[in-house]
Each structure stands twice: as C-alpha cells, then as structure tokens.
Amino acid sequence: MWGECGENRKFEPINDKKMATANTLIKTERNKRNRKQYKSNILIRYRDGRSIDLFAKTGFEVMPEFWSMKTQTFNQANGNRFNESFTEEHQEKLRKDLKRLEDFVKDGMNRLKLRGEIIDRDSLVRLINQFHGKQTNEKETLAGYIHRYLE
C-alpha cells in the first residue's frame, strides 16, 4: 500500500525465481500390450527456468508395469506384483539410487552455473557418467585450450 504523503518506503522486488528441478520419468509405447514385454530406460529431466529443459538416460531400467505414468514414480499399489526379476528390495534400491542421482545432478549443475559454464545436455550426460563412475572423454574447448596454453 501507499504510505503517508512524503513517507519513504522501501520496496523490495519479489524473488519469483524457482529452483532448478531434476525429475525421473520413462517414455513407453502407447500400446499397453507391448509395454510389459521390455524394460524401459529411466530418463532424468533437468529444468531450470524456461530456458533450460534437458533430458538424458540415467543408466537405470525398469519394467513399465512397475512404473506409474501418471506420477512418474514407482507404482504405490504394487501389492503382490513383485517377482523374482524385480523384488521389493530391488525397487527400494533403485528408488534410493534415483534420488541420489537427482541430488547429484542438481548439485553438479549448480556448481557449473556458479563457475559460469554452459549448461547443456552434454553437461548432464557428463554428470550422469560421473555418478556411475564412468570415465568421460571430454572434448577440450577453445577456452580450456587457451587457459592451458597460458599456464
């Protein structure tokens, strides 16, 4: 509201920037009969504002019958659907691994932003490979080459 005449008011801008998010999801064929015959790759989606929306494979797979397409998480009402290939322990381990991966990606992307590096799909894939302990063959950028040359 407006103050009294001549009163100085300090207006602070509202910070409506949302934090970056990392979510897991799967994409399957529309034909439900074929859905149960194969494992689907679990993807990670990293979003930061309107300008950054990236997808990449996580390296994990799940049978679509154990995944809820509506909530993009494991089915809550699995009941007795577990079998020898996908046990309740396997689901819990996978759930924890996916949560750790989401946190790892968010932290890694925040570090990249603070360093002023470009955030793209390659950055996301490199972070996923680091999470799994895979060696990445990073291509040297021009800025990296100049920095290395000057040292």
Image (tube, rainbow, N blue to C red):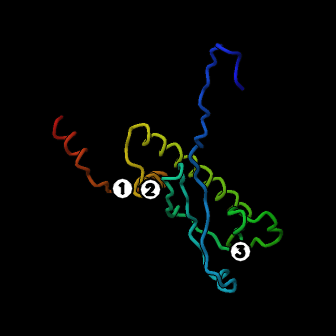
Q: Looking at numbered disc 2 in the image, what kind of residue is underneath it? A: Asn
- Cβ atoms under marks 3 and 2 closer than 8 Å: no
Q: Is residue 76 left or right of residue 134?
A: right
Q: Position of residue 137 (x, y in %)?
A: 32, 57
Q: Residue 94 appears in which quarter of the rendering?
A: bottom right
SS at mark 1?
Answer: loop
The residue indicated by pointer 2 is 129
Which residue lies at the image location 42% right of the left edge and 43% below the top edge? 112
Q: Is residue 43 left or right of residue 68?
A: left
In the image: residue 136, left or right of residue 42: left
Depth check, front residue: 78 or 142: 142
Q: Position of residue 110 (x, y in %)?
A: 49, 41
- Point 69% across, 86% down: residue: 33
Query: Which quarter shows the C terminus?
Result: top left
Q: Residue beneath label 1, please? A: 136
Tell whether label 1 touches label 3 (CB within 8 Å).
Answer: no
Q: Residue at x 22, y 39 (%)?
A: 147
| Amino acid, disc 1 | Thr
Query: Cα distance, mark 3 to mark 1?
Result: 33 Å
Q: Which residue corresponds to mark 3?
A: 65
Q: Are marks 2 and 1 in contact (CB under 8 Å)?
A: yes
Residue 98 x, y percent position in the rendering: 61, 55
Check disc 3 and give the amino acid type: Glu
